[in-house]
Amino acid sequence: MSNIIKDISSGNQAKESLIEGVNIIGNVIGSTLGYRGRTVLIETEGNKNYPTKDGYDALQAIHLENPLHNLACELLKEASQKTVDLAGDSTTATIVLAQAFVKYSYEEFKKGKSPIDIKNDIEKSRDKILEYLEKIATPITDELIYSVAKTSANSDEEIAKIVTDAFLSAGENGAVAHFRSDTDETYLETIEGTLVESGYVDDLFINVHSDRTVVFDNNPLMIFSEINFKTVNQISPFLEFAANNNRELVIVSEMEFHVKDVLLKNKLKGALKISVVAPPSFGQKRKDTLKDLAMICGTQCITTLSGDNFDGRTAEFFGECQKIVIGKTDTIITPKVDETISEKVQGQIAELKEVIKNTTSNSEKKYCSSRISKLSGGISIIKVGGVTESELLERLARVDDAVKAVYSAKEEGVLAGGGIALMNASADLSNELDYVSSVAITTPFFRIMENANFDVTEKRKLKLFEKVKFYLKYIFCLEQGINKVEIPKYPIGYDVKNFSKVNMFEAKIVDSHKGIKNALVNAISVANTILLTDNIVSLKREKYEL
């Protein structure tokens, strides 16, 4: 049991402190939203300060001194991380929506409505909004890849172009990865290989420090395992073989900390040329991915049926590849040229295509297509450069967002951007949604307009400002219980770059459906947590009296 002294705060004071923290974070991160969003300047240790317009990047840099404010910050970080993990982008939308749902749900609470009733009403509305978004989502086209990338890269046209080129070069079944460049230039490479969406488990495995990667290019040995290695004895036969034959070795598996620690010590002493890669995905998807990767490398995956004694059995589970490049979040395996392996891989691809042909499940079709992509090879690699370390970090963040957003858009399609999809959901479902949800989901639109900083003294901006007041009138009517004002029909919205009313698809202003969907779900989760919180147990700080 922990003997660390804790503080307890209760009731509305505790809830309001959390809300203050949400507002502090929401105001900062929300300022980056949209084409005319603002930059956040981040101070780091060692005087390596850098500006960013990436909401996720800015959020990760924030730690607040007040314990309850910081607790709210951590809740928002968890929500945004879930959005990143599932959709790759829309973290800023997550924060903006969370702040709005917290605000309006607390207003209802102060009027005397039960927190449980508020929560239940919001969740019923959430399901209706998600159904609405799915109906209006549009499959992505090659022309819209650029738009998704540009929106996600905070309107950086150079990054949007290179990300678009990368996806078009990779083809339908290809993959896109990104690493640091060995120069200050950002450029594109296309290679044959397989992309794994996971990387090394510890920075100490790095052997190429210029781009922070692990590179083995002398036909490294490969081990793939579904089981969690709990003792060094389980893998010692593989380690001994690699050491005795001076071979590079990569283990793709979970393992206990002390096992990894032994491998690191041997690597640092020069006794082993080794790296450990985190197994990708979870559950059945992980099993299938490891099986496919093992096949590409000419071996089989270790499973619970393999036992845990590999003395004299190393040949059964050793695979090989021509080259492997392991980054922080991505790994690229370049297979050896082998006709036997190629025939097996093509056979597996044929089986998966047959499943796609015969199934009526869209999710199964997408899953099989993803596996075919892994087996087919063909990777576009974006090498990201920058003149300074701060510029490099900023560009890496933008490329990462853009690549992940395009992947999400390819999976579930796109929505008209600029907050207009949720604005129309509020209008079209006005008689079906609760008050909190109706108002909260319009917030991304208003925040984008606010960040555009309209100057009503300019004639062209004055016209648009009147349109904004029209939307404000709509919100006012909602508050009065009147739902008569019409919203411009989807996908018509406003281009804050050119201050014009446009068809958002024609103007190429789009969002990933998967991103907006997950932003909404995770934002509501945070708001409900805060709404239902009545007591907070926090670490005691001397400075604050709670």
Image: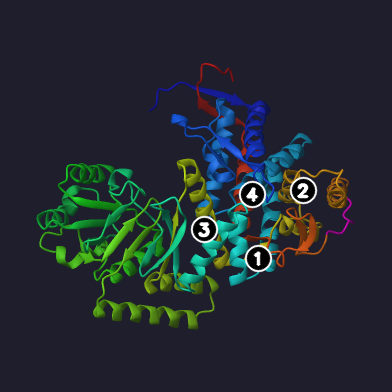
Judging depth in this view, the residue of 165 and 326 nearest the camera is: 165
Helix, strand or loop status at disc 1? helix
Query: Residue tagged by mark 3?
Result: 404
Q: Which mark is residue 134?
A: 1
In the picture provided, is 155 more to the left or to the right than 539? Answer: right
Q: Which mark, by number, is residue 519? A: none
Q: State the residue in front, 267 or 535.
A: 267
Residue 486: say if magenta.
yes
Image quarter of residue 215 = bottom left
Q: Is residue 514 visible?
A: no
Pair 4/1: label in front: 4
Residue type, mark 2 in image = Val
Real-space Cα distance between discs 4 and 1? Answer: 18 Å
Viewer-side label of 1, 3: 3
Q: Which residue is mark 2?
A: 439
Crowding around mark 3 (Cα neighbors within 10 Å: few <14, some 14 to 19, many 20+) is many
Q: Which residues are magenta?
A: 481-487
How packed mark 2 is, by other alpha carbons closer than 10 Å (few <14, some 14-19, many 20 or more), is many
Q: Residues within 10 Å of mark 1 (few under 14, many from 20)?
A: some
Please tell me in which quadrant of the rendered image residue 107 appears.
top right
Report, in whole angstroms, how far the alpha carbon at label 3 lies from the one at label 2: 29 Å
Q: Is residue 232 visible?
A: yes
Taking the image as shown, residue 296 lies to the left or right of residue 85, namely left
Q: Earlier in the sequence, mark 3 or mark 2?
A: 3
Question: Which tag is nearer the camera, tag 3 or tag 2?
Answer: 3
Residue type at numbered disc 1:
Glu
Helix, strand or loop at mark 3: helix
Instruction: Find the distance from the CA under tag 4 to the CA under tag 2.
Output: 15 Å
Q: Is residue 274 above or below residue 340?
A: above
Amino acid under label 3? Answer: Lys
Judge by depth and name the residue closer to the eye, 528 or 225: 225
Can you identify the residue that label 4 sits on? 93
